[in-house]
Amino acid sequence: QVQLVESGGGLVQPGGSLRLSCAASGSIFSINSMGWYRQAPGKQRELVALITSGGSINYPDSVKGRFTISGDNAKNTVYLQMNSLKPEDTAVYLCNVHVRTVYGSRTSYWGQGTQVTVSS
């Protein structure tokens, strides 16, 4: 079993910044990718940022230049630095990891989500 612990959400004014973190622990042999998704009320879940074990990074156009994803392999932790936040960034942000477990299975896990609210 793999556990994800997210932190860093909250309320911020437009133009402000927040940093999210997600720490993975448990029966992890290796991590293939770690990413952040978000889901606003009435909308589909969308990818915000993805980083692979090979170092590839992917952002949608909506956050390019404002959000930065980074990882700490030693801590199995991924971070999302969010700058120049806009009201439309308001959503529940969820961490996702694709891992190979010590048992040999390859599985995707989701965090519980952290609320980000951008409002004046």
Image: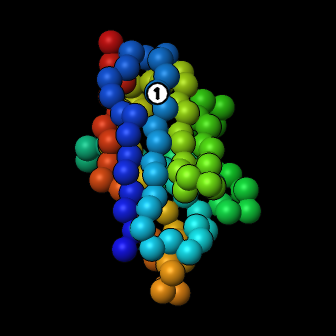
Residue beneath the point at 37% across and 51% down: 5
Using the rendered image of the protein, determine whether residue 89 is visible from the camera's viewpoint: yes
> Looking at the picture, how far across and down is residue 117, in whole percent?
32, 28
The residue lying at 37 percent from left, 20 percent from top is: 12
Residue closest to the far top = 120
Q: Secondary structure at mark 1?
A: strand
**Could you tell me which quadrant the C terminus lies in?**
top left
Residue 60 appears in the figure: no
Q: Position of residue 79 (x, y in %)?
A: 54, 42
Identify the residue at horizontal 46%, vertical 27% (top origin): 18
Figure check: 119 above or below 59: above
Placement of 19 over or under 34, stated as above or below: above
Relative placement, left or right, of 67 versus 39 is right
- Count of marks, rendered view: 1
Quarter containing the N terminus: bottom left
Q: In this figure, which residue is indicated by the disc labeled 1?
A: 18
- Find residue 41 and report its horizontal and vertical position in percent: 26, 44
Q: Position of residue 47 (x, y in %)?
A: 50, 52
Res 62 → quadrant: top right
Q: Nearer the viewer, residue 34 or 3?
A: 3
Question: Is 20 rendered above or below residue 51?
Answer: above
Residue projecting furthest to the left: 41
